[in-house]
Image (cartoon, grey):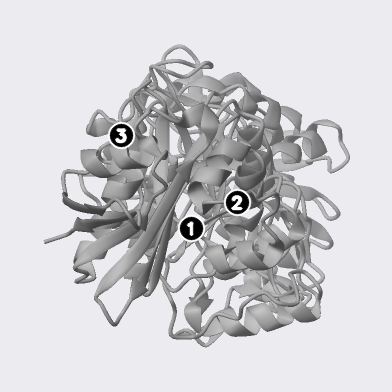
Amino acid sequence: MAVPSTSRALAPRRPAWVESWSHKVTTAEAAVRRVRSGHRVFIGSGAATPRKLVEALCARSADLADVEVIHIMTLGAAPYSSRALEGHFRHAALFIGSNVREAVQAGDADYIPVHLSDVPRLFRSRQRPIDVALITVSEPRPDGTCTLGASVDVVRAAVDSADIVIAEVNPRMPETSGDAVVRVEDLDGLVPHTAELPELPRASVDAIAERIGKHIARLIEDGSTIQAGIGSIPDAALAALCEKKDLGVHTEMLSDGMIDLIEQGIVTNTRKALDPGKTVTSFVLGMRRAYDFVDGNADVLFRSTEYTNNPEIIARQPQMVAINGAVEVDLTGQVCADSIGPTFYSGFGGQVDFIRGAARSPGGRPIIALPSTVHADEISRIVPRLTPGAGVVTNRADVRFVVTEYGVADLHGKSVRERAMALIQIAHPRFRPWLMREAKAARLVYPDQREPSEAGPLYPEQWEGWITARDGTRVFLRPVKPQDEDLVKEFFYGLSPETIYLRYAGIRKTMPHEERLRLVSIDYESEMTLVAVTMEEGHDRIVGIGTYIVNPGTNEAETAFMVADAFQGRGIGTSLFRRLADIARTKGLRSLVAYVLPDNLSMFRVLKKSGLSIRADEQTGRVEALLG
């Protein structure tokens, strides 16, 4: 955290508002004398932490006993949480920031696990009544109002419900809108104090975060509304959205990365169902540029977390995308995000609020993103089971997309077996054999499931891509994945007897598990299988399969493909074959060979439309497509 040098001269003269509200103006030392032993004292959040008041409060610790200090994340020192002031103050953390983490972990401070959307109710219902609120505000205006500036979040509810509200007035605090507006007459003390706001430099984005960000960006469609938090992965995801259009913002935190998108015209907020034209947030945290951006900006609407983090409100935004992190994810999809084993580290924050809201949004995308490993690839963050003592923040029923640098696992509506297979696929290759062994031991997957090797194969995402069928249907072509076995089963049993006969040159009524397993468990080198996938009400459906198997002795590969009956005649088979040919060409293969029944006219049409040189033997049905 850096506190910059003053970027403009600090006003030496006495501001006009001091005269207008002289009966409320006081010093920090005098103001905090209103705090009594046994009080519960709320401290304002983030960049609006009233550091002068905090300093004054702790300076009179000898006069106080059993004062509870409560807040979410604050910036700057938190001396009230030190062991030296034990008995005078005890902190209750609604979110464990870096300045109080040591105290919480040592048992010198308390942790209250709570959703950020629910914190205001704790105050308003008097379950956790606030005796004194210490906050920071912008300078009073001629109309008798000031604003909560950079942080509205839970501060609004604390101000509304506290018995006494003391405000540090900082001319460097931006004037913000919405729930940020406060009447000066409702404040019990004004403490002038000019100071630069603490800044949060952007996290460095390494190659892993960049790859994760690109995977996330591929899940986000034009017109989506975005929520993202702090860190290199959210920053990387936002940076990867540079080609999107008409995005919206509904978030608990506004960051420099989101401001970049607004200034570039990528965020327009025009397609939002709620608050169209407005960027909605509960607090802003970043560099000074971010505070200047929101200063007097009517297009940025600050709301309490009662609104921004309300899952019902979030769900009303179509195509809501929530991007959140995790410490670890187990093979069933349970997410630990607030602890490292039994050691508390952060808090619930707004993760579950936004994950649940986005999951219920039409076209919504709830995303959990994390690197696959930690400590220089020594520890996997995809684990067979959560570390003993680890807490579940987001339960397995709420999780949908999990993203690492190795890809995306879509868990929604999937069985535990399918989840385990999908998560192993996006784990670091070094840990995949171990994860598969553990999954087998726990009976999460089939006993005969193939164990991947540490050397790979890595999923070749470069061969993914969208096509448009002749009727306008959007179809996604991609290499098959081990977790596709059930989709392959559904595809096969949906085929007509005629289509099956033409593909297999005979009558087949079943495709047993062993055969499906072989089809989806490939090395992407000696074998390649592509699937054509449509999205139906948010769920994948395979509508075509194309495959080849390399014959190393002849430098050619035998190929075959089939398309679901309802999707035949739309060009999907041709696209599958052309993509297979492109892949085979990069592998140095000379040709693709198919064996075709004489009455399989559709197969002949696909081969002829491929644009390749074709050699056909009518007697054997052997058709060779030359790749040179």
Q: Quadrant of the C terminus?
A: bottom left
Give whichever of discs 1 and 2 has the lower sequence position.
Answer: 1
How far across and how far down the image is residue 370, in percent? 52, 63
Which kind of residue does numbered mark 2 sit on? Val
Residue matched to label 2:
488
Where is mark 3, residue-wise? 244
Q: Is residue 175 visible?
A: yes
Element at badge 1? loop
Distance in Å between CA atoms under marks 1 and 2? 9 Å
Please tell me whether mark 2 sits on a helix, a strand or a loop: helix
User: Which of the two discs, 1 and 3, labels the residue nearer the N terminus?
Assistant: 3
Question: What residue sits 75% from the left and 74% below the top?
Answer: 385
Which residue in the protein does label 1 denote? 480
Helix, strand or loop at disc 3? loop
Is residue 158 found left or right of 408 in the rendered image? right
Of residues 463 and 329, which is closer to you in this image? Answer: 463
Q: Is residue 135 left or right of residue 510?
A: left
Find residue 566 and report its horizontal and vertical position in percent. 53, 27
